[in-house]
Image (cartoon, helix red, strand yellow):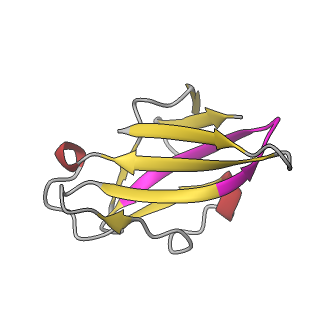
């Protein structure tokens, strides 16, 4: 799992690349990135499966904010990113959401 942030020089935005490693979802056929930035839409940001078996997606986000997110594996299993900047409790389960801060 990893998060890469590439800040744009001309705009208050960053290209943020999220990657879920193959070891976190070895049997997965689909992973979606779900969070504040896409209104928690479970189909909005499908991640690309890499040859290594990892899943990757890049989104453009406004800087100066924090965004909660999680990975949804095969539409059933929620997974956090253990490389996130921090974690906060979510309002629906006893689990935490991952947070990326820009």
Q: Is residue 68 shown above or below 32?
A: above
For image coordinates 75% across by 46% down, the residue present is: 8
Residue 68 counted in the magenta span:
yes
Residue 86, position in %: x, y?
56, 25
Q: Which residue lies most toward the bottom here?
A: 43
Lateral position of residue 21 relative to residue 57, left or right:
left
Task: Give the image quarter of residue 50.
Answer: bottom left
Q: Which residue lies most toward the front here?
A: 9
Lateral position of residue 76 relative to residue 71, left or right:
left
Q: Which residue lies most toward the right here?
A: 11
Lateral position of residue 27 relative to residue 15, left or right:
left
Q: Quadrant of the C terminus?
A: top right
Q: Which residues are magenta?
A: 60-72
Q: Quadrant of the N terminus?
A: top left
Residue 55 counted in the magenta span:
no
Task: Give the image quarter of residue 65.
Answer: top right
Residue 101, position in %: x, y?
68, 32
Q: Is residue 85 shown above or below 100?
A: above
For image coordinates 85% across by 45% down, the residue present is: 12
Task: Give the image quarter of residue 2.
Answer: top left
């Amino acid at each position: 799992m990893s998060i890469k942030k590439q800040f744009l020089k001309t705009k208050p935005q960053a290209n943020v690349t999220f990657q879920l490693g193959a070891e976190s979802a070895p049997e997965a056929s689909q992973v979606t990135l779900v969070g504040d930035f896409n209104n928690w839409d479970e189909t909005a940001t499908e991640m690309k499966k890499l040859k290594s078996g990892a899943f990757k997606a890049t989104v453009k986000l406004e800087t100066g904010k924090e965004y909660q997110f999680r990975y949804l594996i095969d539409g059933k299993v929620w997974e956090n990113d253990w490389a996130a900047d921090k974690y906060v409790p979510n309002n629906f389960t006893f689990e935490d959401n991952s947070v990326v801060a820009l």
